[in-house]
Image (cartoon, helix red, strand yellow):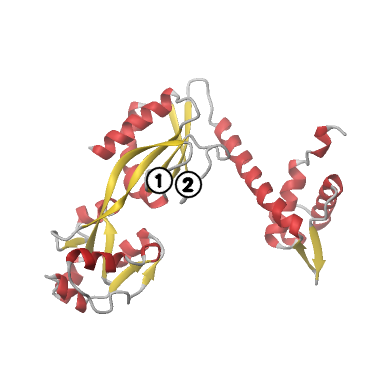
């Protein structure tokens, strides 16, 4: 059997992925602007080609089999990589270098992007593509030239270049500080404590460093993202503990003010610029590496 026979068509894979995601051939057809019968035919051709049943029909719905679940994960990865590769080659010219970087969304939005004009002006021949990734990944299976990482300087088969340590501070809106008369750490008993979901112990950690007990330290509303909790604090909903590097605009504009300047919280984690070690470093990547490290250290 020719090895090419086992390669399904992109159309069949796309139909399978959409049907699996929606649990419906009809909704997949609407998304792909095809007929329901076309989706059904594509899935059937795919199942016949690989000789595996991918769907079961249950009460007018299609449900993935165990093999279908396993196959879907790989198909979604392959389609994503194909889209990324296509976008990358569409932006390619002989005179242009393209760098694809995995970034932490809030760090990229709040710190990196506002500084990019200086790099773009100095290197107009380098095109930068950014995609969000919150956890370390395998550079062998993901098409990234580099990544921004928060945590410890450990990443398999990659070099971690230190960018900056993280210092978190207690902030509120100036109106909230005045209304609640927040002058000393003990005054936080009169404040609503805003919590971030991914850093559930931030207030308790800060109290330990500050050396005092705060009743109800774990009580208060919770927000999933830094941008949400920063906006909530600026809107006067309470006091928050936030990385200073991610709220530069709010502090500069005065929408947020820092409480207790002598009580910052420095963590053992830091931000790193990560480059795979088993690839050659292009001139474009070398230029961006020098630039981002200089920006962070400056």
Q: In this view, does 16 lie to the left or right of 298?
A: right
Reading the chain from its start, which is encountered first: label 1 or label 2?
2
Give the number of the disc on residue 136. 2
- In the rendered view, would you say 79 is above or below 266? above
Residue 237, given in percent of the width and then of the height, sits at: 28, 72
| Cα–Cα span, label 1 and label 2 | 7 Å
- In the rendered view, would you say 237 is above or below 262? below
Residue 269, given in percent of the width and then of the height, sits at: 32, 51
Q: How crowded is mark 2: few (under 14 residues within 10 Å), some or many (20 or more)?
A: some
Q: In this view, does 10 lie to the left or right of 160?
A: right
Which of the two residues, 180 or 205, is positioned nearer the viewer here?
A: 205
Residue 99, given in percent of the width and then of the height, sits at: 47, 32
Q: Quadrant of the N terminus?
A: top right
Q: Quadrant of residue 272?
A: top left
Give the number of the disc on residue 149. 1
Which of the two residues, 274 or 259, is positioned nearer the viewer here?
A: 274
Residue sticking out furthest to the top: 94
Residue 265, given in percent of the width and then of the height, sits at: 23, 58
Give me the residue at 48% from left, 40% from top: 156
Contact (CB < 8 A) between labels 1 and 2? yes
Give me the residue at 44% from left, 42% from top: 155
Give me the residue at 81% from left, 33% from top: 3
- In the rendered view, would you say 142 is above or below 106? above
Q: In which quarter of the image is the C terminus?
A: top left
Q: How crowded is mark 1: few (under 14 residues within 10 Å), some or many (20 or more)?
A: many
Say if residue 93 shows up in the picture.
yes
Say if residue 33 shows up in the picture.
no
Dot 1: element: strand
């Amino acid at each position: 059997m020719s090895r090419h026979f086992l390669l399904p068509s992109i159309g069949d894979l796309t139909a399978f992925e959409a049907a699996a995601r929606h649990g419906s051939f009809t909704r997949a057809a609407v998304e792909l602007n095809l007929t329901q019968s076309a989706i059904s035919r594509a899935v059937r051709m795919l199942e016949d080609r690989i000789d595996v049943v991918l769907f079961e029909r249950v009460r007018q719905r299609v449900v993935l089999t165990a093999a279908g679940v396993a196959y879907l994960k790989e198909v979604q990865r392959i389609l994503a990589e194909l889209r990324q590769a296509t976008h990358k080659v569409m932006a390619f010219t002989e005179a242009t270098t393209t760098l694809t970087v995995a970034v932490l969304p809030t760090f990229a939005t709040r710190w990196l992007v506002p500084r990019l004009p200086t790099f773009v002006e100095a290197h107009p021949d380098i095109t930068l593509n950014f995609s969000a990734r919150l956890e370390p990944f395998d550079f062998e299976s993901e098409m990234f030239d580099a990544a921004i990482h928060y945590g410890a300087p450990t990443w398999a088969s990659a070099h971690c270049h230190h960018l900056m340590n993280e210092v978190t501070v207690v902030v509120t809106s100036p109106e909230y500080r005045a209304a609640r008369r927040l002058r000393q750490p003990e005054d936080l008993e009169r404040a609503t404590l805003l919590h971030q979901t991914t850093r559930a112990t931030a207030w308790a950690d800060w109290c330990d460093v500050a050396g005092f007990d705060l009743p109800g330290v774990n009580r208060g509303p919770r927000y999933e993202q830094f941008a949400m909790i920063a906006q909530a604090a600026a809107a006067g909903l309470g006091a928050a503990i936030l990385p200073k590097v991610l709220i530069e605009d709010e502090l500069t504009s005065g929408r947020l003010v820092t409480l207790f300047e002598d009580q910052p919280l420095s963590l053992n984690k830091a931000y790193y610029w990560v480059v795979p070690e088993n690839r050659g470093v292009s001139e474009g990547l070398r230029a961006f590496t020098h630039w981002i490290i200089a920006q962070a250290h400056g």
